[in-house]
Image (tube, rainbow, N blue to C red):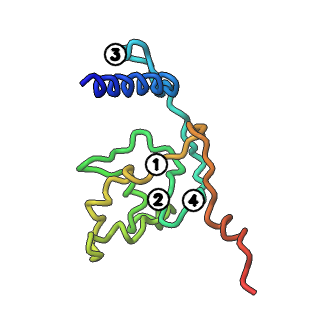
Amino acid sequence: MMRPFLLSAFAGVTCLLAGALFAQEAPRLTGPAPFTKEAAAPPMQRQITDDVRRKRNYPDQPPLIPHAIEGYALDLNANKCLSCHARKFTEQSQAPMISVTHYQDREGNTLGGVSPRRYACLACHVPQTGARPLVPNNFVDMDALVEGEPRGR
């Protein structure tokens, strides 16, 4: 009767000691103390508005917006983006036309206007800013990877 008790006590003490020896403090999230205190938001970064189209990093990446969009109406009743980028306005505005995929439904059928699922431009397209990355980026473009590969004989 005493032996099972001693074995379990020994196992418990061993676990406690091992836990104390190998315990590492869990990473902590940072923020204001106390956590209920509101902190001031960092300033918004200035948008790059030079109208220069940026190279895409991968196929099918949505293009970045190279111009200011502050104050653009984008709601159920209005979409300022379409006043330049819709098919019928590109000749006058000289803006690139939105992709033909924006005129297709889920089944690939061509529609007479922009598909409702592609109407909210800012769901995919974002303005470019001069903000520094928050985390290191070691992304390598696909072309750079392919260029480094030896060619066939």
- In primary-sequence order, the first of circles 4 and 2 is 4
Who comes first in sequence, dot 4 or dot 3? 3
Nearer-N-terminus badge (2/3): 3
Asked if the residue at tag 4 contacts the one at tag 1, i.e. Cβ–Cβ closer than 8 Å, the answer is no
Name the residue type under label 1: Val
- Residue at the (39%, 49%) spot, across then down: 122
Q: Evaluate if marks 1 and 2 touch, with contact meaning CB atoms under 8 Å apart.
A: yes
Q: CA distance from mark 1 to mark 3?
A: 31 Å
Q: Considering the image in quadrants, where does the C terminus appear?
A: bottom right
Q: Position of residue 4 (x, y in %)?
A: 29, 28
Q: Determine which residue is flagged by label 1.
A: 126
Q: Amino acid at mark 4?
A: Asn
Element under label 4?
loop
Residue type indicated by callout 3: Thr
* Disc 4 target residue: 57
What amino acid is found at the position of numbered circle 2 in the picture? Pro
Q: Residue at x 37, y 17 (%)?
A: 35
State which tag comes first along the sequence, 1 or 2.
2
Indicate the position of residue 101 as horizontal and vertical percent values: 37, 70
Q: CA distance from mark 2 to mark 3?
A: 37 Å
What distance separates the C-alpha of mark 4 from that of mark 3? 39 Å
